[in-house]
């Protein structure tokens, strides 16, 4: 079995902090993506990796991204659906609570690959405590130039917002 990248370092003390996450290689993927790869190269890499969505269908992420129209005059938005309203599901909440910077790192790389400059994390309304955890991690990412205008001195800019849902299954 391969590396469990999503869960790697998840039990490390203070892993929620930017400083600790970064010291363990966090955001290295963002640096590599923004400074050495094109969006098409990222999509090809994700497709080759076999990465699948975390929803019930497990659809291949690279295939989904190949259908995305990247060149358009209209703005694009990336929505991270972390509503997690299916009974007994806790896959998203655990990651957001324990290692929020891993989610943000993935969203930055995804947004760059898809030419998106605004991303929303949609979370279940009942998980109000996660809003603070995520907003703190987002704030740290801005403070360290991984979010905002001209990330890491590149031409890419990205803003991420947390949006809690209204508590209905249909929202997710």
Image: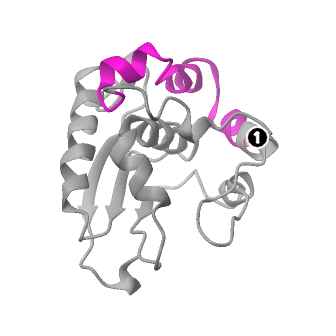
Q: Using the image as rendered, state which of residue 168 and residue 144 is in the foreground.
A: 168
- Give the main secondary structure of the magenta stretch: helix
| Residue at screen point 81% across, 42% down | 48
Residue carrying label 1: 44
State the image coordinates of residue 121 (x, y, percent, origin top left).
35, 56
Q: How is the image coloured?
A: one colour
Mark 1 secondary-structure assignment:
helix
One can see residue 165 in this view = yes
State the image coordinates of residue 97 (x, y, percent, origin top left).
34, 47
| Residue 122, quarter of the rendered image | bottom left
| Residue at screen point 37% across, 25% down | 151
Instruction: Let me know if residue 40 is in the magenta part.
Output: yes
Q: Is residue 60 above or below residue 19?
A: below
| Residue at screen point 44% across, 43% down | 103
One can see residue 74 in this view = no
| Residue 117, quarter of the rendered image | top left
**Crowd tier of the residue under label 1, counting other residues whose Cα lies within 10 Å: few below 14, some 14–19, many 20 or above:** some
């Amino acid at each position: 079995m391969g590396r469990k990248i999503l869960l790697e370092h998840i039990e490390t003390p203070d892993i929620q902090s930017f400083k600790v996450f970064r010291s363990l290689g966090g955001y290295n993927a963002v640096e590599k993506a923004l400074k050495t790869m094109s969006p098409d190269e990222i999509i090809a890499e994700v497709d080759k990796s076999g990465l699948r969505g975390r929803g019930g269908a497990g659809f291949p992420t690279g295939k989904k991204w190949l259908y995305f129209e990247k060149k358009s005059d209209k703005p694009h938005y990336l929505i991270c659906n972390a509503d997690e309203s299916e009974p007994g599901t806790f896959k998203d909440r655990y990651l957001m609570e324990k290692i929020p910077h891993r989610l943000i790192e993935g969203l930055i790389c995804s947004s760059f690959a898809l030419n998106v400059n605004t991303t929303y994390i949609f979370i279940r309304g009942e998980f109000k405590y996660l809003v603070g955890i995520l907003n703190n991690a987002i704030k740290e990412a801005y403070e360290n130039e991984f979010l905002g205008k001209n990330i890491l001195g590149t031409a890419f800019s990205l803003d991420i917002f947390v949006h809690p849902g209204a508590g209905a299954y249909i929202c997710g």
